[in-house]
Image (cartoon, rainbow, N blue to C red):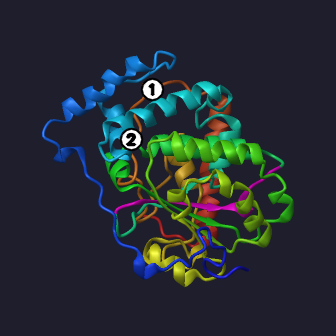
């Protein structure tokens, strides 16, 4: 396994001591946020080829937060957001958590979301790559599940301002799985997340990455901006350096943390809006994501009941196997 930051993106060693908290300005600090929002809205007429489907204040604010209230940059990001969706319509067909492929990816933890924030108030996403059933769903499906989760999380203004941290564990990720890392989809993911989505990624941490993953990183490196490269940290099998960035007390046991073993069904059920059998003590997503909009009562079909009961039974089995205490 590679040691911490042995793979140098910018021909330099990563130094934890050189990092400092980055502070984002909130729109609450502006004299009149209505004027700033309207300034972005006024620029839409300059891009008639783009169909801006949403122009409400709350939607525009997320782009302003992502670009520190810079109006031209915020509008450019918003234009990229919609232009990307127009160019890649196949990604957003049946773009819902209940779509069978997306649902399976979510249930396998693509992505997972920790219920607690890090010390800087950032939302933490975790991905355990060995859980990828590449025979059942593709890398594109994983990307769709990730985008859908981010759309849900970015509704909360605290996530817009503080940003996200991503931890990717490559333990037991096989060479066969790596052969399904489609270069076209990887490029599509980089374009979509780097330039076309209103999220501030503060750090992407890889642990236990094998040599063939580092080889894949070499391929995608030319598509990364310098600012993005600076936010990628390769820790190898040195978990202590990961803990310098993400505190142990919020990380699951699989990542050397002090929290319980990670259960991917927790976030999957949140996205699928399934009723919980019981809330696991101390684990609630109320702080990291907005509550789901209330739905009108509807009659569930037998298939829906079967699907929901299956997820609940899996939750019960997971809790029993890991000895988790229920509240």
Residue found 61% across the figure and 60% down from its top: 127
Quadrant hosting residue 177: bottom right
- Percent from the top left, x then y, of residue 246? 46, 72
Residue found 82% across the figure and 65% down from its top: 174
Task: Provide the residue span drawn in magenta.
Answer: 121-134
Residue found 54% across the figure and 24% down from its top: 299
- Percent from the top left, x then y, of residue 30? 17, 43
Which part of the image, by quadrant, shows the N terminus?
A: bottom right
- Percent from the top left, x then y, of residue 160? 37, 48
Q: CA distance from mark 1 to mark 2?
A: 24 Å
Label disc, if present, on residue 127 of the rendered structure: none
The kind of secondary structure element at disc 2 is: loop
Residue found 53% across the figure and 70% down from its top: 324
Residue placed under numbered mark 2 in the picture: 155
Residue 238 visible? The answer is yes
Residue placed under numbered mark 1 in the picture: 297
Whichever of callouts 1 and 2 sits on the residue coming sooner in the sequence is 2
């Amino acid at each position: 396994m590679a040691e911490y930051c042995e793979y140098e993106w910018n021909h330099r060693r990563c130094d934890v001591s050189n990092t400092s908290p980055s502070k984002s300005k909130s729109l609450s600090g502006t004299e009149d946020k209505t004027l700033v929002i309207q300034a972005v809205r006024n620029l839409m007429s300059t891009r008639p080829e783009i169909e801006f489907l949403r122009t409400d204040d709350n939607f525009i604010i997320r782009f302003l937060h992502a670009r520190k209230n810079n109006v031209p940059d915020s509008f450019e990001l918003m234009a990229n957001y919609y232009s990307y969706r127009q160019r890649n319509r196949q990604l957003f067909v049946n773009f819902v958590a209940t779509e069978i492929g997306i649902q399976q990816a979510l249930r396998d933890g693509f992505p997972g979301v920790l219920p607690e924030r890090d010390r800087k108030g950032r939302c933490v996403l975790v991905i355990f790559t060995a859980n990828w059933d590449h025979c059942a769903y593709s890398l594109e499906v994983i990307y769709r599940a990730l985008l859908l989760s981010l759309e849900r999380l970015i509704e909360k203004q605290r996530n817009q301002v503080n940003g996200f941290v991503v931890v990717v564990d490559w333990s037991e990720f096989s060479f066969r799985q790596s052969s399904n890392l489609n270069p076209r989809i990887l490029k599509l993911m980089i374009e979509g997340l780097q330039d076309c989505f209103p999220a501030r990624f503060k750090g992407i941490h890889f642990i236990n990455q094998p040599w063939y993953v580092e080889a894949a990183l070499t391929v995608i490196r030319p598509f990364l901006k310098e600012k993005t490269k600076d936010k990628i940290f390769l820790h190898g099998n040195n978990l202590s350096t990961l803990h310098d960035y993400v505190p142990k007390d919020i990380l699951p046991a699989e990542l050397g943390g002090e929290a319980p073993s990670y259960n991917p069904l927790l976030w999957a059920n949140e996205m699928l809006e399934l009723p919980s059998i019981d809330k696991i003590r101390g684990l609630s997503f109320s702080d990291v994501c907005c509550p789901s909009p209330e739905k009108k009562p509807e009659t569930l079909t037998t298939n829906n009941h079967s699907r929901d009961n299956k997820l609940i039974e899996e939750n019960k089995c997971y809790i029993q196997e890991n000895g988790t205490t229920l509240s």
